[in-house]
Image: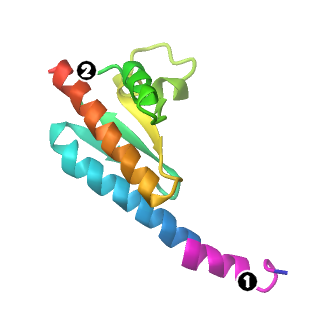
């Protein structure tokens, strides 16, 4: 019934989209203001519930993943999204995938941890 009468689409437009837009904007703003000047680039999410973060520095995203995991934040190193790629592609090794599908408080706490841990990695890479 909610599909037929358009109620589901209305809820998506008035509840879900604004929620995820706020979550994405919160993550992007915090990351750009703190890590952007240090070489972080963020791919536009294009409606997905995650961001691709690209570090313009020689850091190990696998080590970053391990440190973030110990701190309670889970990201996915980009290398897992390029199976079978035979040539070197530094984008693969400098990206992480970060979901913003949690509540805003959890997202903000996770971003704060990511900023601290990634900042330390960036300091060590320079």
Residue, far bottom: 5
Q: In the rendered view, does 43 fall on the left or right side of 5?
A: left
Say which label, 1 or 2, has the lower sequence index: 1
Residue sitting at 39 percent across and 15 percent down?
Answer: 88
Q: Is residue 44 shown to the viewer in this render?
A: no
Residue sitting at 67 percent across and 77 percent down?
Answer: 9
Residue 126 found in image quarter = top left
Q: In the rendered view, does 61 fall on the left or right side of 59?
A: right
Crowding at dot 1, Cα within 10 Å, few <14 / some 14-19 / many 20+, comes out as few
Residue sitting at 33 percent across and 36 percent down?
Answer: 54
Label 1: which residue?
A: 6
Residue sitting at 35 percent across and 22 percent down?
Answer: 90
Tell me, yes or no, whether the two marked residues, 1 and 2, touch with CB atoms within 8 Å: no
Crowding at dot 2, Cα within 10 Å, few <14 / some 14-19 / many 20+, comes out as some
Q: Is residue 89 shown to the viewer in this render?
A: yes
Label 2: which residue?
A: 58
User: Where does residue 105 sit, x and y in percent of width and height?
Assistant: 42, 57
Question: How far apart are labels 1 and 2 at the CA level?
Answer: 49 Å
Q: In the rendered view, does 84 fall on the left or right side of 53?
A: right
> Any magenta on residue 12?
yes
User: Where does residue 122 sit, x and y in percent of width and height?
Assistant: 21, 27
Quarter of the image with the N terminus is bottom right
User: Where does residue 70 sit, x and y in percent of width and height?
Assistant: 44, 26
Q: Secondary structure at mark 2?
A: loop
> Any magenta on residue 71?
no
Name the main secondary structure of what is drawn in magenta. helix
Please state the extent of the stretch shown in magenta in the rendering.
2-15
Q: Nearer the viewer, residue 88 or 100?
A: 100
Asked if 86 appears above or below 80 in the picture, the reply is above
Asked if 91 appears above or below 47 in the picture, the reply is above
């Amino acid at each position: 019934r909610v599909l037929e009468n358009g109620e589901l689409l209305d809820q998506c437009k008035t509840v879900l989209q604004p929620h995820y837009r706020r979550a994405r904007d919160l993550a992007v703003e915090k990351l750009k203001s703190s890590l952007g000047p240090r070489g972080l680039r963020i791919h536009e999410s294009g409606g997905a519930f995650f961001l691709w973060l690209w570090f313009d520095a020689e850091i190990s995203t696998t080590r970053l993943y391990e440190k973030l995991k110990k701190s309670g934040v889970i990201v996915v190193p980009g290398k897992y999204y390029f199976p079978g790629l035979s040539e070197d592609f530094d984008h693969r090794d400098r990206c992480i995938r970060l979901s913003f599908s949690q509540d805003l408080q959890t997202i903000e706490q996770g971003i704060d941890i990511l900023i601290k841990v990634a900042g330390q990695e960036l300091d060590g890479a320079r």
